[in-house]
Image (spheres, grey):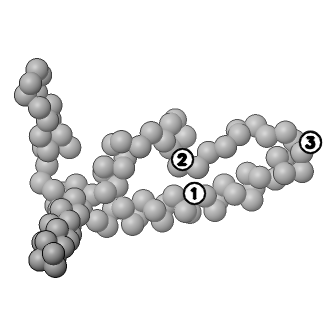
């Protein structure tokens, strides 16, 4: 998404803002670890604990669905839309002052 020049060259966006979704940005900066899961907790809970032995069965599918829904929403918004909404907000607030 970006190019970086050595030294004092700085960084530039390498793609059109219309072609960069919030999901692209999220994926680039959010560290989901090896699992790729937003929500993660103890991989090996105590099997003798009533909560521990059931927690994954209760939460895993729900949390995966929540992550999928969030990612689907992020994919629907481009950086171009965010920039346009920000510029509109700035203009409206300036006009009302």
Q: Are marks 1 and 2 in contact (CB under 8 Å)?
A: yes
The Cα–Cα distance between marks 1 and 3, rounded to whole angstroms, is 25 Å
- Circle number at residue 48: 3
Which residue is pictured at 63% across the width and 62% down the height?
62
Report which residue position mark 1 lands on.
64
Between the residue at mark 1 and the residue at mark 2, the CA separation in whole angstroms equals 7 Å
Left or right for 41, reference 81: right
Find residue 15 and report its horizontal and vertical position in percent: 13, 49
Q: Can the viewer see residue 84?
A: no
Q: Quadrant of residue 94?
A: bottom left
Which residue: 87% across, 41% down?
Answer: 47
> In the rendered view, would you say 97 is above or below 36?
below
Could you say which quadrant of the image residue 81 lies in?
bottom left
**Residue 35 in the image: above or below residue 92:** above
Q: Secondary structure at mark 1?
A: helix
Q: CA distance from mark 2 to mark 3?
A: 26 Å
Question: Quarter of the image holding residue 77?
Answer: bottom left
Mark 1 surroundings within 10 Å by alpha-carbon count, few (fewer than 14), some (14 through 19), many (20 or more): some
- Quadrant where the C terminus lies? bottom left
Seen from the viewer's position, the closer of residues 63 and 85 is 85
Residue with the mark numbered 2: 37
Which one is earlier in the sequence, the residue at label 1 or at label 3? 3
In the displayed orientation, state which residue is furthest to the bottom. Answer: 96
Front residue (pair 41, 19): 41
**Left or right side of 17 for 23:** right
């Amino acid at each position: 998404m970006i190019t970086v020049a050595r030294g004092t060259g700085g960084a530039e966006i390498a793609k059109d803002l219309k072609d960069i979704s919030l999901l692209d940005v999220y994926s680039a900066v959010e560290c989901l670890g090896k699992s790729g899961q937003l929500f993660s907790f103890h991989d090996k809970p105590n099997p003798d604990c009533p909560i521990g032995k059931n927690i994954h069965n209760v939460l895993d599918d729900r949390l995966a669905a929540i992550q999928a829904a969030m990612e689907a929403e992020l994919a629907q918004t481009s950086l171009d839309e965010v920039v346009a909404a920000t510029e509109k907000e700035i203009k409206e607030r300036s006009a009302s002052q």
